[in-house]
Amino acid sequence: MRTASLALIAATLTGTLNPLHGQQIDPRLRGNWTLDLSKSTFGPDGAPSAGVVRWTAHGWVLALAFPGGYLYADAVVTDHGCALIGVSPGNHCSLRVLSPTHLRFTLREGQAVRRVGDIELVAADTTRTVHRVTPRTGPPFTETTYWGRDKR
């Protein structure tokens, strides 16, 4: 599994994979985005203290920093559908392009849907994600995050 993931990362970074969805996803989503904590809402696990996401023609990489020094990071490769990197085994995803600026990401654990996220470019420099989460235990909840384009 680790070797397959490393091969997928290497192919993504070298651009040797042919994007399945790349022509449909608006290139304005590409770039570095910073989490806007003042506008975002989070579920019962609490809010991160910072977050960044980098979108490329091949998917995205996400990193969230939490109080106490905890760091969460994962990636989604979109070259041939939806492939997860850095996520627990048994999880898999699907990605639907609703419009060039609106994607629907679905995360499943086995057959159970755990997260459905709508990712949308709402302005030239703002994206919004609305994640409907169904945890293994506890009631479902919704997280809404806003991300501002990094102008560096």
Image: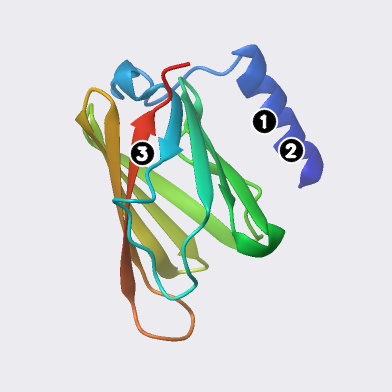
Q: Which residue is mark 1?
A: 8
Give the residue type at disc 1. Leu
Q: Are marks 3 and 1 in contact (CB under 8 Å)?
A: no
Q: How is the image coloured?
A: rainbow
Q: Which residue is mark 2?
A: 4
Residue sitting at 33 percent across and 54 percent down?
40
Q: Are marks 3 and 2 in contact (CB under 8 Å)?
A: no
Q: Which residue is mark 3?
A: 147
* Disc 3 from disc 2: Cα separation: 31 Å
Give the residue type at disc 3. Trp
Q: Are marks 1 and 2 in contact (CB under 8 Å)?
A: yes
Residue 58 place in picture, x, y as percent: 50, 24
Considering the numbered disc 3 on the image, is that residue within a helix, a strand or a loop?
strand
Q: Mark 1 Cα within 10 Å, few/some/many (few <14, many 20+)?
A: some
- When the figure is inspected, residue 126 is found, relative to residue 141, above or below; the finding is above
The quadrant in which residue 147 appears is top left
